[in-house]
Amino acid sequence: MLENRKKWLQGAALLLAAVFVLSLAGCQNGGRGKNPATGQGTETKTVTDLMGNQVKIKANVEKIAVVPIPWATIVYAVDGTGGRIAGMHPSAMKAYQSSILKAMAPEMANANSTFVDNNFNMNYEEVAKLKPDVVVIWDYQPEIGKKLAELGIPSVMIKYGTLEDVQKGIKLVGEMINRPEQANALIQYHQDTNSYLKSKESMLAGKNKPKVLYLRDEQLQVAAGDSVNRIMIETAGGVNVSNEGSGQWMKVTMEQVMAWNPDVIVLSNFSNVLPEDLYANKFSGQDWSKVEAVKNKRVYKAPMGIYRWDAPCVETPLMIKWLGKVLQPEVYTDYDMRNELRSFYQTFFNYKLSDVELDQILNSKQNSDLKL
Amino acid sequence: MLSKRQNLKFIWSTVLAVLLITFFVSLFGGRYVISPYEVSGILIDGLLGEAGDGMAFSVVWNLRLPRTLLNCFVGAGLAVAGAAFQGIFRNPLVSPDVLGVSSGAAFGAAFGILLSGIDHLATVMALLFGIVSVFMTYTLSKLRGESSTLSLVLSGMIISAVFSALISLIKYVADPYDKLPAITYWLMGSFASASYSNLQLVGVPIFLGTIVLLLLRWRINILSLGDEDAYSLGVNPVKTRRVIIIMATLITASCVTVTGVIGWVGLVIPHICRMLIGVDHMNLLPVSCVVGAAFMIIVDLIARTVTAAEIPIGILTALVGAPFFALLFKRAKGDWQ
């Protein structure tokens, strides 16, 4: 009995030792295999991220892991392909699966979406396995940047929230992947749209501006004073009703919504709420029937292109143009929404949109009254 | 010095008056400004069956009234369940969720939201898991071959811990853009979904449970003496305790189902009432109902009026309740046992 047990223990110890030694050898092999590659020094270059840090990265970046959710599509837009995107956030993957981007860039379906979790925590072993040439992280994640540096993986930090941040981000991506012309063309489109919108300011001045509620979900989270949605609405010629609050989104009461009594409601793509849900008064504890926008059937679902147009993204100029058609159609008569989209996708993504795809992007079924 | 009887009468008329006043203040106050005169007109119109068509009418009758009624039901239910539990467990630190009903229901709701968003599934799952968790606690406590209050409380802690961990797991895997905010808001509690239909849904079980607890209140007095004394007085403590646990679970699970987790009310309101009216459960239970309802109305009024953004009720019950309790705690000098 005792003998047996002793033998067994010995066996176990031997096995453990063997595993240990083998794994050590494995590590060394891995190390040796890697050294020449980095040692022979594939060429490097230095880029400046949006926080002003100088980051040394490979001259020819082939694999990028993207933590901030809308940024996978920014990389795609500048690159014209998703081939370099080695990893993206699980929520970005979810948005990708349900957007037109899936048809446009099937290669992105293989991107890793487990290296970062829903709370933006990094799984370092997964990142090490993925071996990206550079990781894009949020401005508030310097510790993650430090840890990645210990693994020998450079990271660039980005800021996010305003339309300028998006333009700076596009420029940074252009530098990272050596496609400055494409980046500049995109930025030019953003700036041209801005000047076009500015040129309408005098015409808008005399107009009656509708009160707009930007509704995120059935929890009554609405776009607040610091949100990009407020900027979009005001630029297009509306008044955001919920400016009292600070921050991006705030949860309000139905009574507050009724006190605001918006003329137009825009529904975000962060949830599945549809105009008919409000028309049918579907949600418990909410009474939409007396709200002006619902009475006049002026509830619209925001479009969703390669990403949700509710957040700042490469398509934000298009979003403001869409809002212009919704809020002030008699002011914005110089363009046709469908042509605008077709030429944007052709120019920047080299993709020809079909009518069905245009309907999908513009949520034409839900927004049939707009006739866009 | 008032006689005991007069004193009782005075306390009763005071708490009832407070409830009545808070009830009407709640109907008159809100983010949508309506003059008190207009509210009175709207209330009278509605009572006479003249359904108005305006926005103000809808605010008063479809938003404020069902919400205030739900405040009453939930506040009264949680307080009476807490008072009953503190009596039968002979422990002032006990609250209605001591047997795991809140964490069970919260897990059910979070799981439902994860699967299909906020809809009927989440409601049903919350109710189901609330009841299942207490059943598990009860079964676990009997594994030890006895049914003492201590083993019940310990089993409750075990079951709660498991469900809390499962809630964390669900929050961890939930999508940060759509599901996670819904779950987080739900866990902090809110009366935002109050409507006549969900008043009907949970009003019946809460009402039923409360009535049974009130009818059993003299037995709670006996149970609070300890099991041996109960036997000698001809009351079977195990059976009685079981009935009370079932009723309190029914109430708490129903509350949690529509409003999310609202802590503190079931713990503190019974204490406050004990300081007001003494330890006799004959008086304590009904007074807890009334004070619980009034407290909930006041706190929810704050939650929905102070800022344009709604403040989660679970945060406020603690922030309003704690200082108030501390004040009473100091003045009562700890002699409420």
Image: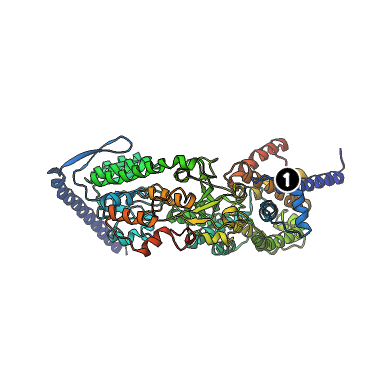
Pick the front one: A288 or B337:
A288
Q: Amino acid at mark 1?
A: Val
Q: Is residue B311 above or below residue B282?
A: above
SS for callout 1 = helix
Camera sees residue B133: no
Q: In the rendered structure, the residue with mark 1 lies on which chain?
A: B
Pick the front one: B142 or A349:
A349
Mark 1 closeness class: few <14, some 14–19, many ≥20 residues within 10 Å:
some
Q: Relative to residue A365, is residue B231 drawn left or right? A: right
Where residue A96 sits, quadrant-wise, is bottom left
Residue under label 1, please give it: B25
The x, y position of residue A262, in whole percent, is 57, 49
Q: Is residue B184 above or below residue B336?
A: below
The x, y position of residue B276, in whole percent, is 76, 43
Quadrant where the C terminus of chain B is found in the figure: top right
The x, y position of residue A22, in whole percent, is 20, 55
Q: Relative to residue A332, is residue B15 drawn left or right? A: right
Where residue B325 sits, quadrant-wise, is top right
Quadrant where the N terminus of chain B is found in the figure: top right
Q: Relative to residue B315, is residue B330 drawn left or right? A: right
Camera sees residue A294: yes
The x, y position of residue A334, in whole percent, is 39, 50
Instruction: Please say which color scheme the image uses.
Output: rainbow
Seen at 42% across and 58% down, the residue is A362
Pick the front one: B231 or B276:
B276
